[in-house]
């Protein structure tokens, strides 16, 4: 028996990622986002959505600079990521507060958070208001990955990254479980 539940934004699984950008004075800010997804192969692109009805410093910085970095935290970063999502760069230097270090991105005017093992450098190619949020599409112009998360073919291995997941319904963080099947192969048994 299925039950009807009041409509709300949801996605399973949802990530907890961190968008970072510089403001006009060159100060770095970073904010946690669950509204994030890949959205194009060519060009490689991601989309993020930031609430525009509330005061988010990162939204202002990204819209002004037209560039941002997107860091993929690992499960071990849950507390720091949570802090980036409850404190505002308008009030504090969040990176300093959690002792995270950062460097300038190679291709865009944003900062890469060193503690995150994989980061994307993105240039804004589209901005679209959707209800309460501003949906921003970023073309990925560079990917930076720690050697520690790469396999022997220099590809990012999900198990090594151990990315942080987020459940917006229960406000909980999760880690991803083990690999269960090969994509583009598991379904072949139904192919006539
Ligand atoms: C787990 C988590 C996920 C979040 N996801 C989003 C999101 O997708 N979009 C958004 O606008 N705010 C999101 N937030 C809230 C912002 O991260 C938060 O308001 C932050 O303090 C903004 O910081 P800033 O003012 O420095 O930009 C999330 C917070 C948490 C804890």
Image (tube, rainbow, N blue to C red):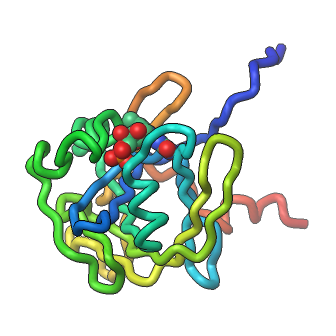
Hey, which quadrant is residue 46 in on the image? bottom right
Q: Nearer the viewer, residue 95 or 158?
A: 95
Horizontally, is 111 left or right of 33 in the view?
left
Residue appearing at x 42%, y 45% in the figure: 56
Residue 172 in view, yes or no: yes
| 9 is higher (above) or lower (below) than 145 | above
Residue appearing at x 31%, y 71% in the figure: 110
Give the percent coordinates (x, y) of residue 118: 32, 66
Give the percent coordinates (x, y) of residue 85: 35, 39
| 110 is higher (above) or lower (below) than 18 | below
Hey, which quadrant is residue 172 in on the image? top left
Give the percent coordinates (x, y) of residue 25: 23, 66
Give the percent coordinates (x, y) of residue 10: 64, 36
Q: How many marks?
A: 0
Residue appearing at x 83%, y 14% in the figure: 1
Residue appearing at x 39%, y 54% in the figure: 58
| 98 is higher (above) or lower (below) than 39 | above
State the residue lying farthest toward the right. 192
Q: Nearer the viewer, residue 142 or 188?
A: 142
Hey, which quadrant is residue 165 in on the image? top left
Q: Quadrant of ligand 1?
A: top left
Locate the C terminus by quadrant: bottom right
Horizontally, is 135 left or right of 80 in the view?
right
Residue 182 in view, yes or no: no
Horizontally, is 58 left or right of 180 in the view?
left
């Amino acid at each position: 028996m299925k039950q009807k539940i009041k409509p709300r934004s949801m996605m399973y699984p949802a990530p907890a990622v961190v968008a970072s950008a510089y403001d006009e004075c060159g100060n770095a800010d970073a904010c946690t986002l669950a509204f994030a997804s890949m959205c194009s192969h060519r060009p490689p692109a991601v989309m993020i959505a930031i609430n525009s009805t509330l005061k988010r410093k990162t939204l202002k910085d990204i819209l002004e600079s037209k560039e941002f970095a997107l860091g993929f935290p690992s499960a071990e970063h849950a507390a720091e990521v949570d802090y980036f999502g409850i404190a505002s760069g308008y009030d504090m230097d969040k990176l300093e507060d959690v002792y995270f270090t950062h460097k300038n991105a190679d291709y865009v005017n944003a900062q890469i958070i060193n503690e995150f093992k994989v980061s994307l450098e993105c240039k804004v190619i589209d901005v679209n208001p959707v209800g309460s949020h501003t949906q921003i599409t970023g073309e990925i112009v560079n990917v930076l990955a720690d050697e520690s998360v790469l396999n022997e073919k220099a590809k990012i291995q999900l198990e090594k990254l151990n990315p942080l997941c987020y459940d917006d319904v229960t406000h909980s963080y999760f880690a991803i479980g083990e690999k269960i099947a090969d994509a583009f192969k598991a379904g072949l048994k139904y192919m006539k």
